Image (cartoon, helix red, strand yellow):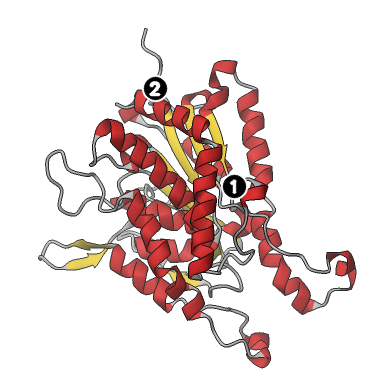
Amino acid sequence: MAEEKKVRILSLDGGGIRGVIPATVVAYIESEIQKVKGENARIADYFDMIVGTSTGGLLTGFYLKPNQDPTPGGPSTDYKAEDALKLYKDRGYDIFNKSKKKAYAIRQLVNATKYDPTVLEEILRSHFRVKDENGGERDMMMHELLLPCTVTTYNMNDRKSLFLRSVDKDREDGPREFKVWEALRSTSAAPTYFPPAAIHNYAAKATEKTTLYNLDGGVFANNPTMCAYAEARNMTFPHRGINTPPSANQMLILSIGTGGGNFALDGYQKASKWGVISWAKSIPNIMMDGSIDTTNYQMRQIYTTLNEIHHDSYLRVDVQPDDRGYAADMADASPENIKQLELAGQKTVEYYKEHLDHFIKRLLDEED
């Protein structure tokens, strides 16, 4: 009797320009797959769902944009994993360092946002365009992404977490449809870094037309792996022969971090006497990094309760503490720091190489 197929899930942490790290890891995975399957193989061909937060959400979009000029036997997506990494390296400085606002103290009391989102928005809009029926171009919609995916965000209207999915177009409780670039802008709207994102539900039959004002999903799930697990538990994957929501032993999950926990907490011994400004500087990092290890602990607990044959079906990959030679600021996209981040990604691949190679083999063995 053939072994039951598993749902293959990729989860990508948030972390600003530290997205270079998971981009480096995924580029390695794709390159190893290509050695076996040919140069047109793409990471999207070997996963069934991708979930990302913030910078991980941006990567999700790039990995899943379908090829706009498909040919028989050609690549399934517009971008290679290496293209996403190159984008961070080529445009990271423009998104962050070059877009930094002048830090006048009086202005910061009125508007604490450090970066102008114009460049980020232009990049996202230009990369997520598709051909329309009249031969022109239009913004790509979430349901047009290649695989089921979710990006996390926090909705200020309702003051609760919001999951922007590619499979929400036909929801029974009211359809939701978002432009890809707006969803990605939404998941990356880190407090004090970028202003909240204003996005809209474009579903034709949407009953709620209110503009949604959203923050970075990292405020509640900077490591979205548990979200990915929960999402999969509410879906079916008929193409994998899984016609009921899968349990943990039917999932193969790869979770990739961005080397968080590297930020400075200067003078934390006197935190009881901190003023508003000191807390404001520290809270975003504390909030966005605080849940990362907790989520990994929860996932490990789930998988260690399963039969031993399933223990290697969950793999968490993140930068080792001694390899975190990059800047603490997750918005430092200087050429020097980009090099350090790419080096950290390469060291992470080296550290986990045996586990990653085993996981890649599992992905290939699970191929339809």
Q: What element carries label 1?
A: loop
Answer above or below: position of 122 versus 56: below
In the image, 41 versus 159, the foreground residue is 41
Whether residue 75 is visible? yes
In the rendered image, the residue lying farthest to the top is: 1
Q: What element carries label 2?
A: loop
Answer above or below: position of 114 versus 72: below
Answer above or below: position of 287 versus 223: below
Quadrant of the rendered structure where residue 182 is? bottom left
Q: Quadrant of the N terminus?
A: top left
Q: Which amino acid does label 1 sit on?
A: Val
In the image, 99 versus 324, the foreground residue is 324
Spot occupied by residue 97 in the image (x, y as percentages of width and height): 51, 76
Using the image, tell me which numbered label, if any, was put on residue 168.
Answer: none
Residue placed at 60% from the left, 52% from the top?
A: 259
Residue placed at 52% from the left, 40% from the top?
A: 350
Q: How far apart are marks 1 and 2 (CA)?
A: 30 Å
Residue at which label 2 appears: 5
Q: In which quarter of the image is the C terminus?
A: top left
Q: Do the residues labelled 1 and 2 touch (CB within 8 Å)?
A: no
Q: What residue type is labelled 2?
A: Lys
